[in-house]
Amino acid sequence: MMKRKISASTLEKKIFMPFVLFLGIAFIIFIDITVYKAETIIKTLENFRGWIFIIGNIILVHNSIWTAIRIKDISIDDSFLYISNLLGKEIKVPLSNIVRAEQTCLMRVFNEFVLITLDVESEFGKKIFFIPDGRKHIFLEPHPVVDELNRLVSSHKQKKRNEETGG
């Protein structure tokens, strides 16, 4: 099998979406400051609702940026998983180093995330997140790429065991 990409448009999710979210919240705050006088904003901050709004937006931006930083671009072939951070760094991980692939519920409202757990530490860590290509928002069953990865890993490990035992 030739190397093929199994992750979605990572560049868009990693850079564009957090930037748009940040600009949107900055725009809302700018409108609040220009439309309402500073005294009104200070009064808003004196009540609980104003603080909830500000803290909620800080948490939303933080989590979006943190998630975007962790998303990787993933390709696969018969023997290796290729992991890229979109900054020119790509590593090659043997399929036998993968413990499992599973779908996560991390911000699943917006995207389906797949978590690949490695048995050894890589330059990108032991847990690799990516957004799979294809299907959108079927919440009841795992993404087909999860089953495909687990099947490839299982088959690769079985083949490796057979070679080691001479069978």
Image (cartoon, rainbow, N blue to C red):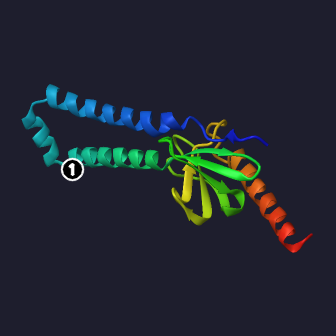
Q: Amino acid at mark 1?
A: Phe
Q: Nearer the viewer, residue 121 or 13?
A: 121
In which quadrant of the rendered image does the N terminus lie? Answer: top right
What residue do we see at 44% from left, 47% from top?
Answer: 69
Q: What residue occupies the far right of the structure in this picture? A: 167
Horizontal side, residue 19 vs residue 106: left or right: left
Element carrying mark 1: helix
Mark 1 is surrounded, within 10 Å at the Cα level, by few (under 14), some (14 to 19) or many (20 or more) other residues, namely few
Picture quarter containing residue 122? bottom right
In which quadrant of the rendered image does the C terminus lie? Answer: bottom right
Horizontal side, residue 51 vs residue 104: left or right: left
Q: Position of residue 107 (x, y in %)?
A: 49, 47
Q: Is residue 55 above or below residue 119?
A: above
Q: What residue occupies the far bottom of the structure in this picture? A: 165
What residue do we see at 33% from left, 49% from top?
Answer: 59
Q: Which residue carries the number 1 mark?
A: 48
Q: Position of residue 151 (x, y in %)?
A: 78, 55
Q: Position of residue 68 (x, y in %)?
A: 45, 44
Q: Nearer the viewer, residue 132 or 118?
A: 118
What residue do we see at 67% from left, 48% from top?
Answer: 140
Q: Position of residue 153 (x, y in %)?
A: 74, 58
Q: Is residue 116 above or below residue 64?
A: below
